[in-house]
Image (spheres, rainbow, N blue to C red):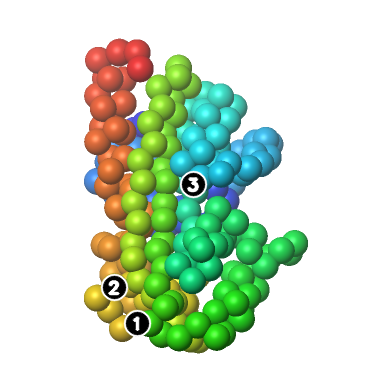
Amino acid sequence: MTKLVLATKNEGKVREFCEIMGGLPVKIVSLIEFSDSPEIVEDGRTFEENALKKARALANFTKEIAIADDSGLAVDALDGAPGVLSARYSGEGATDLKNNLKLLDDLKDVPSGRRGAAFKCAIAVVTPNGFEEAVSGDCRGVIGFEMSGREGFGYDPLFIPEGFEMTFAELGKAVKNRISHRFKAIESIKPVLEKILAGQKKDLSF
């Protein structure tokens, strides 16, 4: 089984990748297994730039196929913020709770009709011999007025996807993994991974 190294230590993200990519003949491992991996500064202007930077660095370091994502929340009323700064939105020492509370505070005067937002995800795959590709996916919805639900991570307790009346954290992973930004991006990257795996079997170079 081919090993894929996922550029994250976020256990929630690892679970989502494993569940959504379950049909592929791959073993997904995370940076938890590479304690000496280099720190990668996510200074790209877009999610795609950050995903590619992380995947390139990890493929070079591990000599394995590397897959990386960068994702976040873009809120219409905040001109796309927090965007690529989603994980660090509340500043130094940011946590999911602090980020959610800051978002609620920033939107405290924004009425329900103007609370549109989108979760966005870019995924990049890079092989040790230089093949690389990036794809993206998004999920539209609105930001609630209070945190609700216990499942998921990040902004899941605030994000209500289109067509639903509950947050991702209330809907749970079974629903989220069918409609999320990450699901859409992973579905788009699957054909790329299948191409890589087929090339390995035929001893092709990418």
Q: Nearer the viewer, residue 141 or 169?
A: 141
Picture mark count: 3
> In this figure, which residue is indicated by the disc labeled 2?
162
Secondary structure, mark 3, is helix
Above/below status of 80 relative to 163: above
Q: Disc 1 vs disc 3: which is toward the camera?
A: 3
- Name which of mark 2 and mark 3 comes first in the sequence: 3
Which residue type does callout 1 highlight?
Met
Tags 1 and 3 touching, CB below 8 Å: no
Q: Residue at x 32, y 55 (%)?
A: 183
Which residue type does callout 3 highlight?
Phe
Secondary structure, mark 2, is loop
- Name which of mark 1 and mark 3 comes first in the sequence: 3
Above/below status of 72 relative to 203: below
As measured in the structure, the alpha-carbon distance from the residue carrying label 1 to the one carrying label 3 is 26 Å
Say which mark, if any, is on residue 47.
3
